[in-house]
Image (cartoon, rainbow, N blue to C red):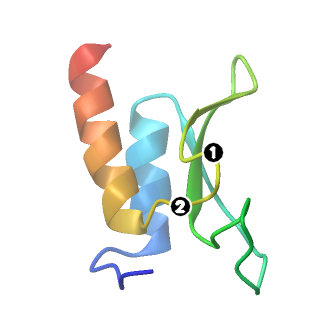
Amino acid sequence: MMESIHSESQARRAAKRVGLQARKSRWRDNSIDNLGGFQIIDPMRNRIVAAEKFNFTADDVIEFCADYGKRV
């Protein structure tokens, strides 16, 4: 996984600003279903919006939330 230039807290704040939640995997070993990064959750519907396999970096979260905020 590529190193992110943004912090985990910046990613969580970006998600919160658009009404989503950025959840970071705490799994230490990579697996097919858990790549150790972030997942985006819609807390009102309790469903995964993006990165089902925890494959987003903090940068990916911020970019996704910026685009999501324009659509909503």
Residue 54 x %, y %: 61, 58
Q: Residue at x 43, y 67 (%)?
A: 57
Vertical placement of 26 versus 29: above or below? above
Tell me if 1 is positioned left or right of 67 in this view. right
Residue 11 x %, y %: 42, 59
Residue type at mark 1 is Glu
Q: Residue at x 72, y 65 (%)?
A: 32
Vertical placement of 41 versus 9: above or below? above
Q: For mark 1, does the 10 Å Cα neighbourhood hold few (<14), some (14 to 19), or many (20 or more) residues? A: some
Tell me if 12 is positioned left or right of 70 in this view. right
Q: Residue at x 53, y 34 (%)?
A: 20
Residue 66 x %, y %: 24, 39
Which dot marks residue 55? 2
Vertical placement of 42 versus 31: above or below? above
Q: Quadrant of the N terminus?
A: bottom left
Q: Badge 1 is on which residue?
A: 52
Which dot marks residue 17? none
Residue type at mark 2 is Asn
> Circle 1 — which element?
loop
Which residue is more in the foreground, 64 or 14?
64
- Which quadrant of the structure image shows residue 70? top left
Q: CA distance from mark 1 to mark 2?
A: 7 Å
Vertical placement of 49 versus 1: above or below? above
Disc 1 to disc 2: CB gap under 8 Å = yes
Q: Residue at x 54, y 47 (%)?
A: 51
> Circle 2 — which element?
loop
Tell me if 51 is positioned left or right of 65 in this view. right
- Which quadrant of the structure image shows residue 41? top right
Which residue is more in the foreground, 34 or 3?
34
